[in-house]
Every structure is written in structure tokens, then in C-alpha cells.
Amino acid sequence: MNEPRTNSRDPSDTRAKRDEVTYPIPEPNSFLNYAELRQLARRRLPRIIFDFIDRGTEDEHALRRNRNALDSVRIRPRALRGGGVRNQATSLFGQNCDTPIIVAPTAFAGLVWYQGELELAKAAAANGMPFCAATEALTPVEEIAAASNGPIWFQLYLWEKEEFTRDLLERVWSSGVRTLLVTCDNSVSANREYNIRSGFGMPLRYSTRNLCDVAFHPRWALGVFARYLATGSVPTFANYPAAYRSSILSRNTKALRYQPIGWDHIRWIRDLWKGNLILKGILRADDAILGAKLGADGVVVSNHGGRNLDGAVAPIEVLAEIVDAVGKQLTVIADSGVQRGSDILKLLAVGAKAVMIGRGLLYATAVGGSSGASRMVGILQRELDIALGMSGCNDIGELDRSLIEMPGVKPMAGWRECRSAVPLPDLDPIPDLDAINSPQIAS
Ligand SMILES: Cc1cc2nc3c(=O)[nH]c(=O)nc-3n(C[C@H](O)[C@H](O)[C@H](O)COP(=O)(O)O)c2cc1C
């Protein structure tokens, strides 16, 4: 019998094949998984925006590697244990979270839905998880913080003029944000050729093709773009200094240059920022150690979702080494390529405390605003819950490397000592264990 084919998750497929679906694409807000959601977002968004979100950099090796590396990790489940009430709550920097998922910082999130950043922040708060606002958000950090009753973090890109960065940090602090994430994997701009071809950038480039693209996506054109125009608020980079805050359509954009970031800047930011400091885009243990020595509180092991350095290692390939090096001192978070609850389980089992999701939550916001984002979070939580139960765990604290097999990582490599140990489940309900181990049977 022919198996019905669904979207392949294998990124080594050609793009066309990856998009192949033989089931009808569901109605918005009835998607069942990441692959279905991606199809819906692809339909909803103009191509120029979808590609900006969806694609990687250069030849997209890093993008494919993220998936291949996660897929190559296999789970060795413990039998007959995961049937209880399962718990995925955790705490990050002293704040309780209902799930080990964080909304990753993403530039231009306000383009996928009217005030998309607010929608994402609301969904994050409703689901008890942190939302990380981006420097390149289209909604000011003050508005995001005011609209949410959940934990808000802020991602920082450094500007060339020190005073601009200083002012922004003051705005961030005054809005009540206490966790700052500094992106460390963009000392130079990424080479995203499709953006050059499509005209995506600041400002967006008009062309007949782009106008047709928008015209063929009326729900986006009316629901997002026309709504901005109707409220007289054409999107700008709202966290920029006032003099540089021109609209994404303006030809008179005053260029604001970013500072190529180095370790001295981390020292400078550490002195300036009194809250939690996380370095995002770390892929080496020596860098993580240096970060710890300079006073960072956490790292995000990330290759920027395969969007920056093509050919970069996938985070899960280097996560164990980084956790072993700094897991006692720092909170280690991971991202890039996470699409299923089982991906989250794998990263946590290697030793991450939480994971960030970028594209998945942007697609979800594009499809259904905050309810779309909440639906996607719910799906990931449910998948993680199933993966936990199937692996014989009732709590994410029980995850460890004995549950997984992956190239280069020894089973039970001992990351538990790096974090507060969680006792294994009580063996009392298995009365026959002693009998099985008894000398009579051994003979
Ligand atoms: C559209 C888009 C914009 C992004 N913008 C930023 C950004 O401004 N700063 C940053 O540190 N990371 C940015 N990222 C990277 C994410 O924070 C995150 O590392 C990545 O998306 C995780 O991979 P995933 O998309 O496969 O989940 C962006 C990612 C996407 C998809």
C-alpha cells in the first residue's frame, strides 16, 4: 500500500521537494505541525518576506546541517516509566517558565502581522515563556514591555556611535527589561543573496515584481500593510535613535552603521548593564569560557538559524562541549533548526537549559497572530510531552545524555554535575528488579 506523503523534514531535499504535500493544506489555525505551518505561512506572505524569514545564507549548508545534525541524534528511551503526570516547567534567571521554550529575537517580526512583535509577546506571556525583543523590531521595546505581563528580554546589536547604544540600553532598562542578549555572530553582515535579488532590505525596494507579489497576497496586503498605512504608522526600526527612524519605504533613510562587535565591547556592556547578560551565537567552548570570565550569565549556542556563516557547525554538534566547559557557571540555551518537541528533548538531554525558536513562531504569527503563535507553542509543548513520556521521563530535569546517541558524545558524559542534579525516578514500583538481579537467575 502506498503511504501518503507529507512534507519531508530532510533539508537535503531540493526546495521544491521539501514543499511537497499530498494532504490538502489545512485552514489557518488548524495546522498540526511545523511543516504544515510553514506551508500556510508561505501562502500567506509575499514571497519577498517569506524568503527573508525562511532561507539561510549563501548555499544554505548551515541551514541543512541544523536539521541533519538534529535528525542524526537518536533517542534511547527508558521503558515503562513515563506514564505519570509530566512536567516541563523550568526557571530561567530566577523566573518561573511553564516550558523550556523562548521566543528568539527576530528582526522585522512586525512585517508578518500587524504589530507582530506585540502578538508574539502576548503569546509568550500567555504560555509562560520569555519573549526576546530585537533591536531591529518594528515596535518599540517600551510598548512591548508595557503590553506584556510575561518576561521580556532584549537582543542588542551595537551601533558605531557609543552614545546611541548607551541610550538604547537606558531605554531598555527603563522599560523594565532585565535580561540582555548580545548577538555575537555578526561581526560582518551575512551574505544573503536572495535578499539582494528580491529587494528585501531597508528600505524595501519597489519593483513590478514586488508589487505583483504583494497584490497576489491580499490578506497580507490588507491585513498588515494597509492597516499600518491606515493608522498612519508605516513601520520603522522603532528602537533606532529618533534621527534614524525612517520608514521601511522611505528613500531618505539615514544610514546607521553597526559596530563590528569584539570582546572589548562585551566587557564594556558588562560594566554598563546591571541585569542578566547572555551572549548569543557562541559555538566554541573557549568563547563560552571567555564570556564567563567577562561576567556573562548565559550563552545561546546558535548559528543564527543558518542565516549568518554558511558552513558553520550545528549547535547540537558542539553543545556538549560547551555545557561541559561552562554549564556550572552559565545558563546554556540552544537554538537553530528546532521544529519538533523531540528536537527540544534532544537539546535538553545534551545539557541545554532551554531552547529558542525563531522561524516557527514567525510563521505562526503570520498565519494567526498571537493565537497562531500560541497554537505552535502548544504543539511543541505537546510534542515535547509525548517525547518525554515515550523516553521514560516525567520531568525535563530527568533528561540526560544516557537517553541519546549522537556522533562524538559518550553516553552518560556527566553533565548532571554541571547543574543541580534531579533524582532518578523511584524504582519501588518495580518489585521484580531484585528478583531479576538475584543470584539464582544469574546461575
Ligand atoms: C527572520 C529572522 C530574523 C532574525 N533576526 C535576528 C536578530 O535581529 N538578531 C538575532 O540575534 N537573531 C536573529 N535571528 C536569529 C534567531 O534569533 C534565532 O537564532 C534563529 O532563528 C533560530 O533558528 P530557527 O529559526 O531555525 O528556530 C533571526 C532569525 C530570523 C528567522
Image: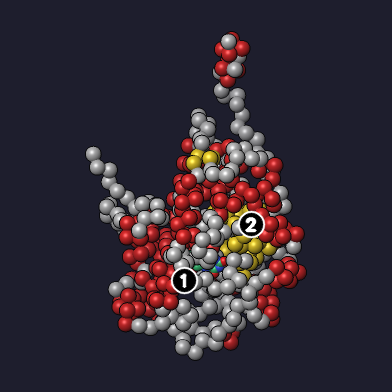
Q: Which amino acid does the dot numbered 2 rest on? A: Arg
* Camera-side residue of 332 and 16: 16
Among the two numbered marks 1 and 2 on one chain, the one whose residue lies closer to the N terminus: 1
Q: Does 10 appear above or below 211?
A: above
How crowded pointer 1 is (Cα within 10 Å; few <14, some 14-19, many 20+) is rated as some
Above or below residue 318? Residue 46 is below
- Horizontal side of 260 relative to 207 (left or right) equals right
Under circle 1, the secondary element is loop
Q: Position of residue 323 (x, y in %)?
A: 65, 49
Marks 1 and 2, how far apart at CA: 24 Å
Q: Residue at x 68, y 63 (%)?
A: 277
Residue at the outermost left position: 1
Numbered mark located on residue 439 in the image:
none
The image quadrant that residue 234 belongs to is bottom left
Q: Locate residue 408, reporting x and y percent.
A: 57, 44
Q: Secondary structure at mark 2?
A: loop
Q: Nearer the viewer, residue 415 or 136?
A: 415
Q: Is residue 173 left or right of residue 379?
A: right
Label 2 Cα neighbours within 10 Å, binned few <14 / some 14-19 / many ≥20? some
Q: Which amino acid, by three-letter code, is at mark 1?
A: Arg
Please give the name of the residue rendered at 53% of the width and 40% of the height, measured from the top-left corner.
405
Colour basis: secondary structure
Q: Which residue position holds label 1?
A: 192
- Percent across and percent down for residue 387 are 48, 41
At x 70% / y 71%, what residue is drawn? 265
Query: Does residue 125 appear in this view?
Result: no
Residue at which label 2 appears: 284
198 over 1 or under it: above or below: below
Residue 51 place in picture, x, y as percent: 40, 68
Answer left or right for 371 relative to 346.
left
Q: Residue at x 37, y 63 (%)?
A: 41
Question: From where the camera sits, is residue 403 visible?
Answer: yes
